[in-house]
Each structure stands twice: as structure tokens, then as C-alpha cells.
Amino acid sequence: MTLLDLPATEARPRPSRTRRRLLTRLAAALVVLALVGAGTVVTVQRLTGLPGNAAFEYGDTVVTRDQLAHRVELLSALYGITQPKGERARASFHRDTAKAVAVSMVLDHAARSRDIVIADKSARDTLASMIGSQLGDGGQAEFTRILGQFGVSERNVLDEIKRQQATARLFQDVTAGIVAGVTAEDARAAFDADPARYATPEKRHLRNIVVATREEAEAILAAVRSGRAFGALAARRSLDDATRTGRGDLGTVTADALETGYAAAAFAAGAGHTFGPVETKFGWNVGQVLAITPAASATYDQVSSQVLDTVRSERAMAAWRAFVAGEIKRAHVEYADAYRPAHPDAPPTDQPGTPAVTQAGRP
């Protein structure tokens, strides 16, 4: 069975949070597999126009609308990827999905054209490390069982890890000269132009409780303010099993590590105070500020290595984006009207090979 064999309407059990964490780390690799892996595309020879069921075409390869729709539903079941609400937002989501898959195919071609080949051993070592860190002893058998539950083989995963590693190698190939050309003088000029950028932002040590409804959150907030222990309530009531065993401890975080609304409430409260209820994508939250670490400015000598790395990274990303934009334009991907992105020739914004994945359960 391939991923494409699973119909969009089939009920699927959700994996536990521990299993979902492992699968989330593999999501970046499996997203492409789920959409354009073996057996999921149609190769056609025709004179002009897209087939009526096409989402897009790259070369002679057509990815159909049904394949994209089924894969989005499957990814939701496996990884908690949620389509936005509202017809307009969903339409934008599907256009973005189509473009992400098309770009991955373009980069596959670019890597092959530069003779970039990833050995099986490299992918196997990466996978073994991931399995060991997430599942521990006996992890391989458990991992195989989890994949079988969703019709995904280890070979599928290894092939997609190889694709991710090939893209990372392509990035290094494209940007090596740019990185090597950055000097200490470049770094100093960047710091002098914006020293506030390298200041240490304010941080807060937070605890949090997630519940399903505003009414529950208000009741918990009232209980804390009347003297009930926040940690005990978190251990007993919070829906977030990633923090519940730690009595709701989120650690020390900056505002940009949190959802905007939650960050505004958390960074407006004083030390020792509670705040909320605040609704996030994970539910209704009641938080508590345990400690505040004030923002602090920095001298160039203190952050010179960081500045140098930042300048190198930014110049490398600028070169990479220009390269990808050129590859996309030369590829002439043809989208169906409903799947045509707003900027089809623009490069994606994520780092190559490292799509952002939000940790489940965090505000």
C-alpha cells in the first residue's frame, strides 16, 4: 500500500503525543513523499493545456487535485497539520501546498544536474539517530509498526531523507563562495548599522495550563487567584501532556517564541502574576510568570561571532533565494487556475531542508 491508496474519507487513529513527536520530525520529509512519491504522479504526452483534474504540471509530470486533497487530509491525521477555516483561507492553503510540491520537484532536478547524490548510509544514520533519540531501546520495531499503521514504508522515509539532504547539499554548493567571502569588516559594519538587533531580548519563565473552554480557563484562573497551587492544577487539569508532568513549566522564553496574543498577555503581566484566559490554536490558556530576565544591550566584542554568522547566513540566503527563483522561472511550472499561487516564481521563505514545524501543545 502506498500513501495514495488511503482515501481522504477513511478514519485513521491518531498516534500518541510521543509517537507524533517522532513523526513530526519526519513530516518535512514525508510531505513531499505524500504528494509526489512513487506512484502518485501521472506522466502524460499531449500537445497543450492541463488535464481537467490537474493541480499543476512540471515537465511531463502532472500532480492531480485529488492527490493534493488526499495528502492534505492524511497529513492532518498524521501530523496535526490543520487547514485554516474559511473558504478563502483554505484556497490559499492549497495554492501554497501546490507550490511547495512544485518547488521540491524543481530542486530535485537542480541537485541531479550538479551530480549531487546521497548515499543510503547517510540517510540510514540520520533515521537511526532520530529513532533512538525519540523512541529509545526497541525503537526500530516501534517505528516500523507506526509507519505500517499509516501505510508508509521505511524505504519511503529513507528516500525522502535523501531528498532533504540533497537539497541541503545543493544549498551548500550554491552558497559556499558567498559565505567564504564575508569578512570581519562586513560584520562590524552590520553591527554598527543596527546594534539593537544584537541585544538580548527580555525573557520570561512561564507556566501554563491548557483547557478546552473559556469557562474552564476562567474557573482555573479564579482558583489560582484564591490561593490554589498553579503547579498542582496544571498537573491535574492541563491538556498539554508535553508540559503537564512538569507542572505546566514552559521554561524561559522570548516573546517571539510564543503565539502573538499569548505573548502580549504573558509579557504584560508582572513577576508572580497570572494572566488569561488567552485563546490559542491549542485551546484556552491560563499562564503564570515565574521570573523576568530584562533585555540587555551588547558590545560588538561580546557578539562578534554571532554577527559574523548572521551576515554569512543572510548573504547565503539571499544567494539561495536568487538561485531558486531562477530555477523556478526556468522550470515553467504550469498551475491550474485554482492552484496558481499569488507569486508562482518567488522562492519559498524557509531554510532549505528545514521547514518549520510548530511543537504540538505549546501556546
Image (tube, rainbow, N blue to C red):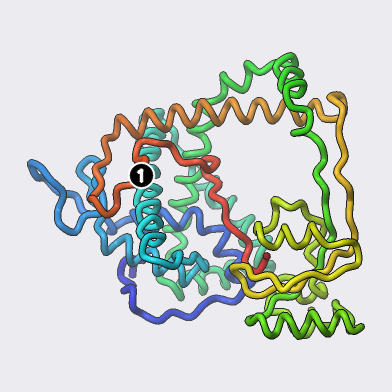
Quarter containing the C terminus: bottom right
- Name the spot of residue 306 as percent of width and height, x first: 76, 31
Across and down, in percent, residue 233 comes to 81, 82
Q: Nearer the viewer, residue 121 or 5?
A: 5
Quarter of the image holding residue 300?
top right
- Secondary structure, mark 1, is loop
Q: Quadrant of residue 155?
A: bottom left
Q: Is residue 351 above or below residue 278?
A: above
Q: Quadrant of the N terminus?
A: bottom left
Q: Residue at x 51, y 25 (%)?
A: 319
Tell me which residue sits at (59%, 51%) in the image.
Answer: 126
- Relative to 142, residue 88 above or below: above
Residue 54 found in image quarter: bottom left
Q: Tell me the crowding category of disc 1: few under 14, some 14 to 19, or many 20 or more residues within 10 angstroms, Cα based.
A: few
Image x and y of residue 113, in percent: 36, 30
Q: Give the residue drawn at x 69%, y 30%.
A: 310
Q: Is residue 135 left or right of residue 57?
A: right
Drawn side of residue 77 relative to residue 98, left or right: right
Q: Is residue 186 above or below residue 14?
A: above
Between residues 245 and 42, which one lies in front from this camera angle?
A: 245
Question: Which residue corresponds to the image point at 41% horizontal and 34% vertical from the top-left?
Answer: 111
Tell me: 70 left or right of 132: left
Q: Where is residue 282? Give x, y as percent.
A: 61, 71
**293 on left or right of 67:** right
In this rendering, the count of numbered labels is: 1
Amino acid type, callout 1: Ala
- Residue behind mark 1: 342
